[in-house]
Amino acid sequence: MKVVGYVRVSSESQIENTSIVEQEERIQAYCKAQGWELIKIFRDEGLSGKQTEKRVGYNEMIEYVKRTTENIKAILVLKSDRIHRMLKNLLVMIQDELKPLEISFISVTEMFDTSSPQGMMFLQMIGSFAEFERELIYQRTKGGRISTAKNNKFAGGELPYGYEIVDEGVIKHQTQASIIKRIYQDYLEGHSMYKIAKKLNNEGISPKRSTKWTSQGIKNVLLNQVYKGIKIYDGKIEKNGIVQKGVFPRIVSSQLWNSVNEVIKRGDIHRK
């Protein structure tokens, strides 16, 4: 029987620990023990299992089994979460992509083969337990962050533009903080969000998550209460969110923040 394999790691630390190699070796050993011909192994390194459109190896594999003349009969993984973390996504792949091609999905360590009804049932049982475990971990992590936030300490997560983390806690990133001040002052002086973004881009100043500033990015900065020293965790104030003061040092005064937001409420029109 001809088969292909798929391996994935989701972080640099895993790559350093050569878990990709370990996955490949165990798949190869399993195929040898079964007397199967392993045609090819596809890999994704340093990529999350959530967004398949970004996983080059995964997409190459799906296209390969659709178009090859090798008569592939199964896709092998070391563990099912290497190919999809969510059960529903895994089932969609099996039903929509593999079943029409009469290709089975086989997990080496979980010992199931979707070519049989029993294998499909076992897969769904394992997937349900895995999702339950992930939800428990998420809730524990969320609970820990909420507890930390209630104690008025930095509860983790991505820092907003303008801040950095040190051993003592969150401090201003001096260069970025000066950009934040400038954005507020320019807006209050009558510049539009579009013009502010355009000027920053022309000067080669980039935001945190992308290469270019946009009007929406500028608006997000102007609306963010963290810049006046207030951080809200777990929802909005009116929904009993946890309001922190002092964890994030203020970059603009409350007066400047309030003045800017009053202008925004009136509408960003007729501005230069």
Image: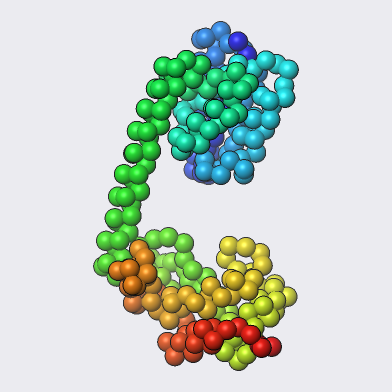
Q: Specify the color scheme.
A: rainbow
Image coordinates for residue 204, horizontal then vertical, percent: 70, 72
Q: Which image quadrant for residue 200?
A: bottom right
Q: Nearer the viewer, residue 164 or 87?
A: 87
Q: Is residue 107 visible?
A: yes
Residue at the (43%, 81%) spot, across then down: 228
* Left or right for 188, reference 196: left
Quarter of the picture containing the C terminus is bottom right
Residue at the (35%, 63%) spot, across then down: 234
Residue at the (37%, 69%) spot, across then down: 236
Image coordinates for residue 80, horizontal then vertical, percent: 47, 29
Q: Nearer the viewer, residue 100 or 251?
A: 100
Image coordinates for residue 55, horizontal then vertical, percent: 61, 40
Measured along the vertical axis of the image, is residue 187 above or below residue 4? below
Q: Which image quadrant for residue 59?
A: top right
Q: Nearer the viewer, residue 247 or 223?
A: 223
Image coordinates for residue 48, horizontal then vertical, percent: 52, 43
For the image, the number of numbered tags is: 0
Residue at the (56%, 44%) spot, across then down: 51
Q: Nearer the viewer, residue 215 or 16?
A: 215
* Left or right for 154, reference 105: left
Quarter of the picture containing the N terminus is top right
Q: Which image quadrant for residue 42?
A: top right
Q: Is residue 173 visible?
A: no
Measured along the vertical axis of the image, is residue 130 above or below residue 250? above
